[in-house]
Image (cartoon, helix red, strand yellow):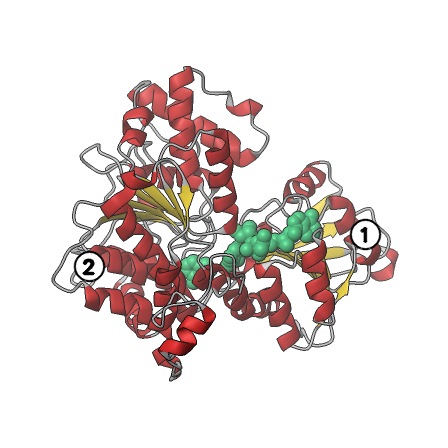
Amino acid sequence: MSVAHLIIEPTFMQTRLALFSTLPYKVADMKSDTVRFGRKELELALHEMPGLLSLREQYRGKKPLAGAQIMGSLHMTIQTGVLIETLVELGADVRWVSCNIFSTQDHAAAAVVVGPTGTPTNPRGTPVYAWKGETLAEYWWCTLQAIFWPDGSGPNLLLDDGGDATMLVHLGSEYEASGVIPSPESASSEEFSIVLQLLHDVRRERGNNVWRPLISKIRGVSEETTTGVHRLYERQTAGTLRFPAINVNDSVTKSKFDNVYGCRHSLTDALMRATDVLIAGKRCLVLGYGDVGKGSVQSLKGQCAKVYITEIDPICALQACMQGLDVVTIDDVVGDMDMFVTATGNHSVITVEHMMRMKHNAIVSNIGHFDNEIDIAGLEALQATGDVEKIEVKPQVHEWRFLRTTHGPDGKGHSIIVLAEGRLVNLGCATGHPSFVMSASFTNQVLAQLELHANAEAYGKTVTTLPKHLDEHVARLHLEKFGAKLTTLTDSQASYIGVKSEGPFKPEYYRY
Ligand code: NAD
Ligand code: ADE
């Protein structure tokens, strides 16, 4: 189904798409070549995802997720396709959107819609609403479509990455209860004004009792990433969390693998696909030296870049020093750096003032979850006043030319190259982390969904992590592929270090 063919009234903002459409799915391209490519890549990825493969084998012929209606909001990549089809094999009824406007791999989306047994003309897979290069209004339209099943019911479980689906159902029900939805004009960002507009439109079309019945049926959420997990703990502390949440990010086999080794793989992949610039010898500033920052530094170091970092936390800063890195402030070095990578999960880490001082053609990118680490809104404001020109090099790669600076070529304005419009560079300009790394993350996701489906009510409205024995199980499932052979503790050794010989091998406070 092509994007251009769908003009249905009344429509949501400029999307030309009915607010509550009857579309069974919406992706960019259902051509048979696209689907074939997607299905082939899903098959190859599965071989590299031993954790998900093993869950499929463990539950073959059983349907432990029967009765689960899972709405997923997570990058629609090939690896996510394997996750979705694992949930379906385990018996779940699934609907999906991407959690980022640039991260969808269109062949993955099409292949998942077709499913293992369908054809492009008779798709039998999972409803997906996602395509690469959505507008923000389209993105939120997609989220709404995935939340509502064709019979009008909603999900009983959410699988979220960054918290957008969780936020929408919470805000929707809170504004219904208060009777007041703030006006879109009052929003602090363009994106939030779209969320508010969506909620106004839903109320206009369906009335003021949509979100409260919907959220009351949601039994829990599993959250993928650091930023989404922060939001959940904030709600838990404020007492506004409406269902139990499993923090998948802080399974060791997620954050100490995906965030670190995934970014080690996918950061330079993105920089190279986007720019083809030699990284060796370049001065690169990584802002934030947490898990993603550490992986990003390794990625750049692997290409022999000269890497500097910024931090606010003395422990992370000291870790960087012990790795031989220079810990600096952006204000001190901004004019010397060739590349910038933000990895803080914080906002306004690179400001317009910083960008005005950068070298000509400095490359600016973000690998944290949202688009506000770099002040893109500030750049757009300068564009509106005619101080900056935005030139598309190719999708997700833009030259921003400052018209009033004088340190560019011939004493004229300088340019900077901004990747993925300040959104996740590894998913906007490349294809994200490789399958093997995502297998560990997504095995934790499936375990979290199984646990919520079986026992959600036992958790109350809290945020919890999976128990350590499951974390160790996820690691074990991935060792064989490396040919790794574990040493077995003797009984006497086990008792000497105070553990059971089958594990868990570390106390909760151990930090890896
Ligand atoms: P983290 O908390 O481990 O690391 C963030 C670091 O940034 C911390 O050490 C913090 O002290 C530092 N920091 C905060 N504000 C700062 C500032 N103003 N200047 C300098 N440093 C600052 O978090 P993480 O797991 O590394 O995740 C970082 C972001 O990346 C999050 O938004 C997360 O959701 C996202 N993420 C992205 C991917 C991806 O594939 N691109 C994968 C995992 C996580
Ligand atoms: N996050 C980082 N890489 C990813 C991938 N390949 N698929 C889904 N989510 C991701």
What's the amino acid at mark 1?
Answer: Asp
Q: Nearer the viewer, residue 343 or 405?
A: 343
| Left or right: 27 in relation to 266 | left
Q: Is residue 406 visible?
A: yes
Q: SS of the residue at dot 2?
A: helix
Where is mark 1, residue-wise?
331
| Frontmost residue, 19 versus 337 | 337
For disc 2, the marked residue is 89
For image coordinates 44% across by 63% down, the residue present is 253
Which residue in the rendered view is the most extreme toward the top?
Answer: 179
Between the residue at mark 2 and the residue at mark 1, the CA separation in whole angstroms equals 52 Å
Identify the mark nearer the N-term, 2 or 1: 2
Q: Left of 508 or right of it: where is 185?
A: right
Residue 106, position as x, y percentages in the image: 37, 58
Q: Position of residue 319 (x, y in %)?
A: 68, 64
Q: Residue at x 45, y 60 (%)?
A: 254
Find residue 6 and report its image quarter: top left
Closer to the camera in the image, 437 or 367: 437
Please say if 101 is above or below 49: above
